């Protein structure tokens, strides 16, 4: 039976998929982050070996005659067809050995989709446990890197079994945080979010930047956030008048401001005081607003000053 090039390619691809299964077009997953340790060198090695083995098997199929490929097509379509299916034995042991060494999620680090943290979810918690803080600090989600996960790795470490790089770093990070969490006879006590951030700041503990930002957003006082929002809004109507009245009262009674004075050190004194409290404004701007505020002061006030 004669096959054209398109038919041959289609049969070869089908046979490759049978032999390699899902690994025929395997690709490493897109990582959420690459913070912390990983074993991507092992992943790269697997990719290279898989690509090499795919080429070897593909070359072997391409070397087959049209009759042999036609038989393979029949056997794929009818799995129960009596046949020795020699093509299934092609590099079978090497394929099986390689697929047993397929990369586990932990080899990619905690940025793997099955391990990566949902920082927004966890930073909303009022308190975090030792294992939760440890996992989040390296970008791992405590729902995937659970307390039991920790126990298994800690037992392995005690038995001097080898661990993947991300797990080794995880236990090191736990050792650091365990020095801060209060321990009772029942275990480590969860700590408030603000306390966790304080520990990280005081000891400069390296943590995933998104975890730190999430903590920071929780710890910033709401009054400060509201004040910052209010400063971004333009003053209108009554609000503006109230502030001008305050300026007028303080300028006149505390600084002795007189709008028509030929020589006055009031604007300079106000600027100096502003500098002392970490604020800055030029004298021209200060004079402008003093004059505007003074317009609200009753004329009799200036008469009494005279």
Image (cartoon, helix red, strand yellow):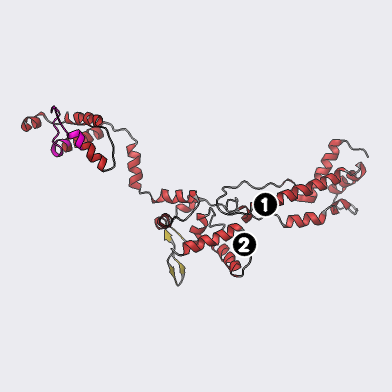
- Could you say which quadrant of the image residue 288 lies in? top left
**In front here: 233 or 136?**
136
Mark seen at residue 119:
none
Secondary structure of the residue carrying tag 2 is: loop
**Sooner in the amino-acid sequence: mark 2 or mark 1:** 1
- For image coordinates 35% across by 36% down, the residue present is 232
User: How far from the left and from the top, in percent, is residue 230?
Assistant: 32, 39
Q: Which residues are magenta?
A: 251-269
Question: Residue under circle 1?
Answer: 43
267 within the magenta span:
yes
Q: Which of 213/158 is in front?
A: 158
Q: Secondary structure at mark 1?
A: helix
**Is residue 15 among the parts visible in the rendering?**
no
**x%, y% of residue 270?**
21, 37
CB contact under 8 Å: marks 2 and 1: no
Q: Is residue 118 above or below residue 184?
A: above
* For residue 64, side relative to residue 33 (left or right): right
Disc number for residue 163:
2
Q: Residues within 10 Å of mark 1 (few under 14, many from 20)?
A: some
């Amino acid at each position: 039976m004669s096959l054209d090039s398109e038919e041959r390619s289609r049969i070869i691809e089908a046979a490759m998929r049978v032999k390699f299964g899902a690994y025929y077009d395997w690709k490493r997953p897109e990582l959420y982050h690459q913070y912390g340790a990983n074993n991507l060198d092992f992943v790269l090695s697997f990719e290279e070996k898989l690509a090499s083995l795919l080429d070897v098997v593909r070359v072997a199929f391409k070397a087959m005659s049209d009759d042999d490929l036609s038989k393979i097509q029949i056997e794929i379509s009818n799995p129960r067809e009596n046949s020795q299916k020699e093509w299934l034995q092609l590099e079978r042991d090497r394929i099986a050995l390689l697929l047993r060494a397929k990369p586990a999620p932990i080899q990619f680090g905690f940025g793997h989709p099955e391990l990566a943290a949902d920082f927004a979810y966890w930073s909303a918690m009022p308190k975090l446990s030792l294992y939760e803080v440890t996992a989040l600090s390296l970008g791992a989600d405590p729902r995937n890197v659970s307390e039991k996960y920790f126990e298994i790795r800690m037992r392995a470490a005690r038995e001097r079994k080898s661990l993947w790089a991300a797990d080794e770093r995880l236990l090191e990070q736990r050792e650091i945080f365990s020095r801060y969490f209060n321990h009772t006879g029942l275990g480590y006590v969860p700590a408030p979010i603000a306390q966790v951030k304080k520990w990280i700041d005081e000891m400069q503990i390296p943590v995933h930047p998104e975890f730190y930002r999430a903590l920071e957003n929780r710890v910033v006082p709401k009054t400060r956030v509201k004040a910052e929002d209010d400063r971004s809004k333009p003053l209108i109507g009554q609000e503006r008048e109230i502030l001008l009245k305050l300026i007028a009262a303080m300028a006149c009674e505390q600084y002795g401001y007189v709008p028509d004075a030929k020589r006055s050190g009031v604007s300079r004194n106000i600027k100096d005081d502003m500098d002392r409290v970490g604020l800055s404004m030029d004298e021209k701007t200060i004079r402008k607003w003093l004059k505007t505020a003074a317009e609200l002061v009753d004329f009799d006030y200036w008469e009494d000053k005279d």
